[in-house]
Amino acid sequence: MDEQEFLEYVQAGGQVEVGDWMPDDYRSRLVKFVEMHAGSELMGVLPEREWILRAPTLQRKLALTAKVQDEVGHAQLLYRVVEDLGKPRESSLDDLLSGKAKFHNVFHYATASWGDVGVIAWLVDAAAIVSQKALLKSSYAPYARIMKKICWEESFHILHGRDVVLAMVTGTEGQRELVQEAVNRWWPPLMQFHGNPIPRDDDPMYVWRIKSQGNEEARQQFLEGYVPQVRELGLELPDPKLRRRDDGVWEYTEPDWDELRHVVTGHGPMSEQRLDLRRLARANSAWATQLLLAEAA
Amino acid sequence: MPVYEVFRQERKGQAFQHAGSIPAPDAAFAEAWAREQYGRRGESVALWLVPRDAIHEVEDFPDEFDLKYRRVDGYSIKSRLKEARERAGTAAPGDR
């Protein structure tokens, strides 16, 4: 098989296994993509971790702890896929902590209240599951297979988030305000989340069918699914231009792509602090890694 | 670090399906990890942890002699069936 045949194979829906031949460009883009996904899962627990000790009830504390465990588990599965493609986990972690590898924009922002925890678990996870469901059809089969487990667990998280939001919007006026403020804070990053609307055939990740849908398709699917769910609670979305056209396409204010670039390159409000915490965690657990590696050697 | 391939069974009687893999220094560690990753919510009734080295993979199935008679696509009965019906004077079920 040469590169052209491989391209035609994956574009026709063909899937690739770990030991199969693949073009270098496919491998390196796949590594970068899955690594970014892994790093996002690992960094994504930090905003939530900040709220474990401040959760309003014991049940919420347990649920949030379980979610954090799930997300770290996803990172482990994803780093495993990357390892099999030839990049050791330690190198992936080096690149994450040095800022060379990126992670999703939404994990670079601060969480101001418990309302943010609900909005993150509901809407950030909803935006993520739109992308992740499309990865069930990834041309790289080991990635597609672990997405089954990941999507399954994400569906709990969305429900947990929605439950938190529902509890607050049916509570006091103050609780309701916390949710509205969180929605206002998270909406711009959420609209940036799926990336700029480049045509999917210009997106190498789509061309190789590492992902199976374009950025704008994902955003439209997110809006179609979740704008009505937000609005039915009487919450407002902070975009006067947001509306569904008669042909079903959602119109919205152009997201701030400069902000997205700035944030994902490590200049978000919390980028450095969160990376510092991750560095500290890695240093503190280095003894366990060493022990395991020594035992395996 | 050795790699264990994980196969999980969702319900008793169903086929085990490949779910992922985990690196672990030994089977006990692999088990502890696999329980967390694939059994935490009762989503599996059994797991098989198989050291990757133990898998003997076969993935080439040459068919030099075109053994079509072993498969359904080796039999095209349409024209024979038509002839047989004509001789018997019976119509196809759809035409009756």
Image (spheres, rainbow, N blue to C red):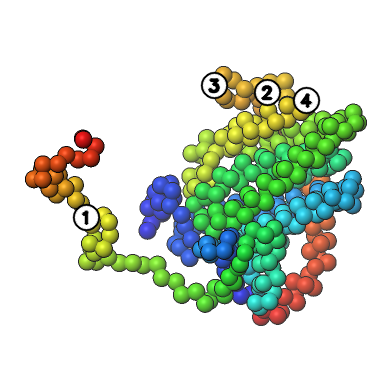
| Secondary structure at numbered mark 2 | loop
| Chain name for mark 1 | B
For label 2, the residue is A242
For label 3, the residue is A247
User: At which x and y percent is residue A293?
Assistant: 70, 76
Q: Tag 3: residue type?
A: Asp
Mark 4 crowd level (few <14, some 14–19, many ≥20, 10 Å Cα): few
Q: Nearer the viewer, residue B18 or A23?
A: B18
Q: Give the quarter of the figure containing the C terminus of chain A.
A: bottom right
Q: Nearer the viewer, residue A133 or A33?
A: A133
| Secondary structure at numbered mark 1 | loop
The residue located at (77%, 72%) in the rendering is A288
| Chain name for mark 3 | A
Q: Tag 2: residue type?
A: Leu
**Discs 1/3, front:** 1
| Secondary structure at numbered mark 3 | loop
Alpha carbon separation for disc pair 1 and 2 = 59 Å
Alpha carbon separation for disc pair 1 and 4 = 63 Å
The residue located at (57%, 75%) in the rendering is B51
For label 1, the residue is B75
For label 4, the residue is A234
User: At which x and y percent is residue B4?
Assistant: 59, 71
User: At which x and y percent is residue A223?
Assistant: 64, 31
Q: Tag 1: residue type?
A: Tyr
Q: Nearer the viewer, residue A274 or B76?
A: B76
Q: Residue furthest left?
A: B87
Mark 3 crowd level (few <14, some 14–19, many ≥20, 10 Å Cα): few
Ranked by sequence position, the earlier of labels 4 and 2 is 4
**Discs 1/4, front:** 1
